[in-house]
Structures are given as structure tokens and as C-alpha cells.
Amino acid sequence: PAATGQPHQMAVATVSPDANRLTLDPERDQNNQQRKLDFLNQRDTGGIYNPHALQTPVSPYQVMAGSVIAASLITGINSDLPGLVVAQVTENVYDTVTGRTLLIPQGSRLIGTYDSVIAFGQSRALLVWQRIILPNGSSIEIDNLPATDTAGYAGLEDEVDYHTWRLVKGIALATLLGVGTELSLGSDESDLVRAIRESTQQNVNRAGQRIAEKNLNIQPTITVRPGWPLRIIVHRDLVLRPYQG
């Protein structure tokens, strides 16, 4: 059955004929559920056998997938605007196989970006890293390595402002304006005065609704302070060379 006629339903779901994927009404999808569904649906279900053969390392000097790089933020994050973020490696990183050859020394810089689109109720900032700059000036581009907190949870969580006070002020202002128009005139009024009062009341109510809607549409602000510890998860092997300062 169709999903119409259910005004309290959180999101209307339809199926795309070409992609066989669930589609949510973007106006009701306040928590970006569509992006989460797309993430889950990207998995490979093409068969029961892995089509990839065992690979021999192309170099002995690799930081392989699954490695964790410790770092801390140099610049802070404020999700009100998009921007770059810089971090610094806080522990030496050695080759994965032997663990004896230094590849990424402590003090290397990480350059990345963060997602400034924040869903309703979200409390963690999503970061990815695009480049590592070594102290000797060498650098390597990396494919959006994700940042996690020290426990391995995706994103970073520090301070969140849901702008609740701004919303309360907007609702209170709209309420006071509506009450003011009701109390401004008594019951002994002419038709002209009554028409003016009702028109004024309607305009004030509409203005109050717009104020409340604008405040409801303000996304939360996530702030992560400089110095915040983090981890970088390597998801593709990094081929490097022994570090020489």
C-alpha cells in the first residue's frame, strides 16, 4: 500500500526502478537516513568467492591498511563553515611488517577537511585527511583517510551547540506578538477596527511562524578545540621510504 494518508510518518519511502534502492523524502529525512542507506547498499554481493588473489607487498616500506596513526589537532573545528584542518602526528610510525623502519616520524603534519553539513541531533564532526607532510619536506597524498577518536569511534566529539536558547526566544517572541494583538483592543469595536485587528493578528502570526521555522532550520554547531587527540585509520596501503631527516 502507498504511504500517503499517514501524516505522522517520519519519511516517505519509494523504490527507484533503475537502482532498486530506498528513497526517502528529503524534507522529512531530517537525520540524513538516505546517506546511511546508500552507505550500507554499496557493499559487494556479487558472489560467494572473493575474486581477488593474494598480493605480495610491492615494497618492504609500507604502512598497511588497518594501521592506526596517532595525532592531535593543531587547528580547531567549527562546523558553521567548511574549511581545512591541520593535525600533527604524535607518535612515530614504522613499517607494518617488521616494525623497525621509521616511515612517518613524530611531528609530521596532516592536512584534511571536515564535513560542515550537520544533521539534526548529530554530535560528532566527520573528518578526512588528504595529505601527509614529513618534517624533511617530503609529502604524500592520501585518499581521504578517516579520523576517529582515541577509542576508534568515527569522527570527533567535543562541544555541541544545538541553539536551543535561540529557538526558545523565537517561539517566545512569536507567542508574545500573538497575545499582544489579542489584548490590544477590547470587545467594543467597529467592523473596520475588527478587520484591522484580525489582519494584524494574521500577519503577526505568520511572522512568528517564520521566525520559529528559521530557528528550527539552524543546524547544530560542532566545535572541536585545538590539541584534541585523534587517530587516523589507514584503509589503503601507503608505500613510503625510510625516513631520513
Image: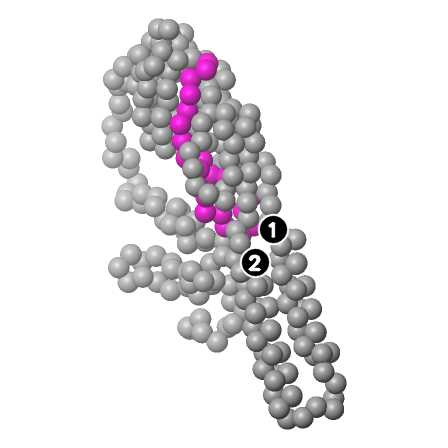
Using residue 131 as the reference point, say whether residue 173 is left or right of it: right
Q: Earlier in the sequence, mark 2 or mark 1?
A: 1
Q: Which residue is mark 2?
A: 215
Mark 2–mark 1 Cα distance, whole angstroms, equals: 8 Å
Q: Quadrant of the N terminus?
A: bottom left
- Residue 194: x and y in percent read 65, 88
Q: 4 or 105: which is nearer to us? A: 105
Res 50 seen here: yes
Identify the magenta region. Answer: 106-127
Outermost residue toward the bottom in this view: 191
Q: Residue at x 45, y 47 (%)?
A: 117
Tell me the chief SS of the magenta region. loop
Q: Residue at x 45, y 27 (%)?
A: 86
Q: Quadrant of the C terminus?
A: top left
User: Given contact means CB atoms under 8 Å apart, are the residues at marks 2 and 1 in contact?
Assistant: yes
Res 152 seen here: no
Up/down of 144 relative to 57, above or below: below
Label 2 is placed on what type of residue? Asn
Q: 54 or 33: which is nearer to us? A: 33
Task: Identify the element where label 1 is drawn.
Answer: loop
Q: Which residue is mark 1?
A: 163
Task: Identify the element where label 2 is drawn.
Answer: helix
Q: 1 or 172: which is nearer to us? A: 172
Mark 1 closeness class: few <14, some 14–19, many ≥20 residues within 10 Å? some
- Residue 125: x and y in percent read 50, 39
Q: Residue at x 56, y 58 (%)?
A: 215
* In the image, residue 5 lies in the stretch drawn in magenta: no
Up/down of 114 relative to 8, above or below: above
